[in-house]
Amino acid sequence: MTDTITQLISDALAIGKRQVVATMELLEDGATIPFISRYRKEATGSLDETQVAAIDAEMKRLDTLIKRKETVLKSIADQEKLTPELESKIKNCWDTTELEDLYLPYKPKRKTRATKAKELGLEPLATIMLEQRERDIELRAEQFLTDEVPDVEAALAGARDIIAEWVNEDANARNSVRRIFERSASIGSKVFLTKQEEAAKYRDYFDYNEPLKHVPSHRLLAILSAEEEGFLRVSIDIEEEQALERLERQFVKGNNSCADQVALAVKDAYKRLMSPSLEIEFRNKAKEKADEEAIKVFAENLRQLLLAAPLGPKRTLALDPGFRTGCKVACLDEQR
């Protein structure tokens, strides 16, 4: 247990650091959440069961993140690509999404169009293209022609594939587009024409579109349920022009044939790699949030049910025996 971990949990949950430390020690000693919240109030500063459970969940999340960081560091070190700057960034990272963005350029991949292009020796051409200093990139591309790269267009296409992968793996680029998703992503659904009759109960979503951040949890879960049943085609997207403008501002620096090629690569990176990846990311986040809200509603409904008078309108006397704090007695009249 480190001071950093306790401070992170304290900040995330707005709970005093001493309370967090005491609760963590009890949890690590094997005490259960109900036991801590009921019998260790002096130690935890009277934290309730919900707060103790939140500390427990945050401990587990950070423990998983720490193990993931160790795996990431080892993987990059084994590739002999771990620089002091990158190591520092990873060690000081406490967000799962940010960590995965840092690891993305070094993550072992299946064979992609970019890896094939690199195997054909086109990475130096991609580097020249991205620098955007060459006036006639087609003439320069002729130097990379081989039996497997028969013409200039094939060389340029391979170099663009490499640049597209670089763009997609750039943490700043992903965060820039991610912010657009956070602010203005919309969810849309269309019914499959052949399934209209079967999907009658989802009629409200046959041609539907709404900002993702405003979608109520019950509506999102209904849409995703209809998609899983094969009735709807669901998408989460943003204005493509806005995303491309940001990416081009970051990567397109010249005004020549190289810049034109980079612009094509940026567009391909967004449409083929980045947009689908971020759509999955935001779909999963939205689903997780909707599930949590649905569970809260169910829990509150169950709470009201359990609080209902079990014997109907009858007077009730309840005893709570205790050795240390004494017995407690509760008397309820027929109205409660």
Image: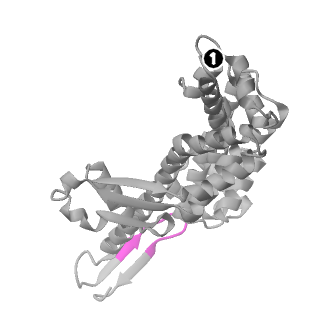
Task: Judge whether residue 324 is colored magenta.
Answer: yes
Asked whether residue 136 is in view, the answer is yes
Asked whether residue 95 is in view, the answer is no
Q: Is residue 42 left or right of residue 77?
A: left
Identify residue for label 1. 119
Residue at the right extreme of this rendering: 84
Image quarter of the C terminus: bottom left
Nearer the observer, 199 or 59: 199
Q: Residues within 10 Å of mark 1 (few under 14, many from 20)?
A: few
What kind of residue is marked 1? Glu
Where residue 273 sits in the image (x, y, percent)?
A: 55, 40
Nearer the observer, 56 or 280: 280
Query: In the figure, 184 relative to 154: above or below?
Result: below
Among the 4 quarters of the image, the one containing residue 44? bottom right
What secondary structure is the stretch in magenta mostly built from? loop
Instruction: Assign a secondary structure to mark 1.
Output: helix
Nearer the observer, 184 or 107: 184
Tell me the magenta residue range.
318-328
